[in-house]
Image (cartoon, rainbow, N blue to C red):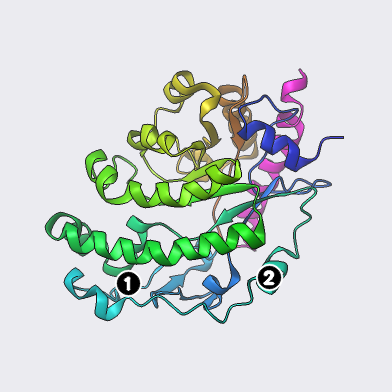
Amino acid sequence: MMTEKENYLMALRGEVPEWIPRNLVASPGHAPANAWVGPGILNEKRTPEGGFDIWCVEYVTTRETGYMALPKPGQFILDDIRHWRDVIKAPDLSHVDWEAMAQKDLARIDRSQTAVSATIHVGYFQQLMNFMGFTEGLCAMIEEPDEVMELFEYMNKFYMEICSKYRDYYKPDVWSITDDTATATNPFISVEMYREMVKPFHAREASFAQDMGIPIDMHDCGRCEDFIEDWLDFGVCCWNPAQVVNDLQGIKKKYGNRLVLEGCWDTQGPVGWPNAPEELIRQQVQECIDTYAPGGGFVFWASTYGAPDDQDYLNKTRWITEEYDAYGRTFYKK
């Protein structure tokens, strides 16, 4: 009998799976198809309230958004890109027992049932914004590109060491590249700037997956479809969350199963509004599946936001799962 993991990896290879996989979320009686796993040491100072990342950026969360984290407002650690060498210090990892850490990080996952996706960091563009805020960070990329590139080289040297250890000790099934480079309407930066200043570092990290022969997943929120051709250059075969502000139907028609769409769910539309009715939620699950699942190249990933004990949030989550189970898990058998 095919496992959730095998079915998910089938989809990422561009094949039509036996049922529509669901990203990260387990259905009752089933293991999750995949899990994002990062080296524990990179998150040891993070807490439900926020905490700090390895670069000493402080984060805050809110209960109402399910404890999603953002840099603490007004407390960016770098105000002048020319001084980054005085502020940004990569931690010493020479003491890390990678074998023991990998065993601990992977202990909760049944690898016979669930694929492990390597999740290393939030990205070069996004981390710069976390250091400086968007106003100063974007100005730095325009006014002092050489300094930004030297900072990215410094970060990349650190992350490449982590990628090497992760490859050897975690042996992932999928490799994830992350960078939120777009707003809901347009990218923050031009394609030319992406190619010159960010893409080379994404490509270096992607080389680990290429050497291992495993799928490469790209996480980029917002209307970021401008970068798809560049992602394909370094082996990306799937993209999350593939938000509806992009021309997803046109993208599916153009690329087919070369680029698996993970998501395609309108989180900002009526289904995300408070007290959205059950009928609407279930209808939207079916419409999402009907639109993007035919022929494969699709992974279901619908979500809603709210406090973990909010009844409206709990109802929506349950309705999404029930409708996915009833409709999505039988879709390819119809």
Q: Residue 311 appears at what percent x and percent y?
A: 65, 57
Please report whichever mark, 2 or 1, sits nearer to the chain's N-terminal start.
1
Quick one: SS at disc 2?
helix
* 330 falls in the magenta region: yes
Task: Examine the image and state in which quarter residue 157 appears.
Answer: bottom left
Q: Does residue 37 appear in the picture of this structure?
A: no
Q: Does residue 103 appear in the picture of this structure?
A: yes
User: Mark 1 Cα within 10 Å, few/some/many (few <14, many 20+)?
Assistant: few
Q: Is residue 314 above or below residue 147?
A: above
Q: Residue 194 appears at what percent x and percent y?
A: 28, 45
* 202 falls in the magenta region: no
Calculate the distance from the C-alpha at mark 2 to the C-alpha at mark 1.
37 Å
Placement of the C terminus among the 4 image quadrants? top right
Answer with left or right where residue 83 lies relative to residue 45: left
| Residue marked by disc 2 | 99
| Residue marked by disc 1 | 73
Q: Are marks 2 and 1 in contact (CB under 8 Å)?
A: no
User: Of the residues shown, which amino acid type is indicated by label 1?
Assistant: Pro
